[in-house]
Image (spheres, rainbow, N blue to C red):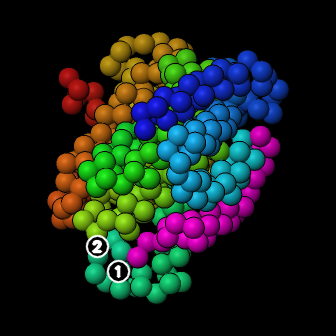
Amino acid sequence: MIRSLLFAFMISFLMNFAFIYFFKHKKFKDTFEGPQKFHVEPTPRIGGLAIVLSVFAAALFYHFTAYKSDIFLLLLATIPITAAGLAEDIFKKVNPKVRLIAAFVSVLLGSYFIDMILTSIDIPFIDSLLQIEVIAYIFTIIAVAGVANSINIIDGYNGLSSVVSILILFALAYVAFELNDSLILIMCFITIGATGGFFIWNYPFGKIFLGDGGAYFIGFIIAMLSILLVNRHNEVSAWFPLLAVIYPVFETVFSMYRRKILKRSKIDHPDSFHLHQLIYKRVIPFIFEVDRNNKLLRNSATSPFLWLICSFGVIPAVIFWKYTYVLLVFVIIFCVLYIWLYKSIVKFQIGKYLK
């Protein structure tokens, strides 16, 4: 398994290097348009393609070294949603409805090949509803699309989404190791390796970006492995993966609430008021006293704060992965602390606390 991780890392590292220096056409690059853009020069946004190809290559390597092919059933389900994301990276005109349909098709493929349907979340009333097949499918599509989109939502600064994804995948890998689930474990390791190869080029200088394709691919894998882990092992609480992904997921939910209820705008309307953007604009200059025009330094200094915030969900999830009520308490604590931190930054009170 370690060989597969290293293989995925090297392929991703070399492929991202090639993409940086050979894909120089403007349609492959991210521009400065939009309030969520904080980089300093046009940058390739197809790092996700390198990750996808590296994961598939590592899966092939694993197949020929371990003589197991079930990993390809997992990867087959990722194709529709990943293709929709990559199309957006290149053409920049893919309708959100098309991406939702792609997520729906990916879930259907997952349910057909690998039993990727949520039938329990350890809440009695909802669990009884999930026994109705149509409701189970709808709930799974919303959950999977939500996790995939949440990785895309936090993909705003160098190294942010890649390290957050690696932390979550390590949590899933740990529990899979404890349960001797080799399929989930190897899938986690391969994805960690491929994401790590991208991270080297993305952080701190932002030579290449993940893009929608990479974010959807990694997010879908995280959602898929989370569902499989819960479905295949009764001892795993459904709240374990939720707590592991609580940072990007709650960021997404809170953003929807903020846009729709507080600002009365469309929930998919981009803005510059995500937590990571507020930290970039209001916390980093205060702590490091850096020039506000030094976007690269501020960009790279932002991500470690969010890695720490993500760990507040990942660490207790790993420790208490069997215990539903303990996990539920930590989910509530995280959400309360997130809202407190967000309000403190918005009201310019964070300086007082830091001092």
Residue 175 image offset from top left, x and y in percent: 29, 51
Q: Which residue is mark 2?
A: 122
Residue 280 image offset from top left, x and y in percent: 45, 28
- Quarter of the image for residue 282 reads top left
Say which of 266 and 236 sits in front.
236
Q: Quadrant of the N terminus?
A: top left
State whether residue 123 appears in this view. Answer: yes
Residue 151 image offset from top left, x and y in percent: 50, 46
- Quarter of the image for residue 293 reads top right
* Magenta stretch: includes residue 63: no
Regarding mark 1 in the picture, which secondary structure is present there?
A: helix
Q: Residue at x 53, y 40 (%)?
A: 65
On the rendered structure, is 248 left or right of 202? left
Magenta residues span 90-119
Measured Cα–Cα span from mark 2 to mark 1: 7 Å
Q: Which residue is mark 1?
A: 127
Say which of 148 and 342 sits in front.
148
Q: Residue at x 48, y 58 (%)?
A: 224
Q: Residue at x 55, y 60 (%)?
A: 145
Q: Amino acid at mark 2?
A: Asp
State whether residue 333 appears in this view. Answer: no
Q: Check if mark 2's residue and mark 1's residue have beta carbons within 8 Å.
A: yes
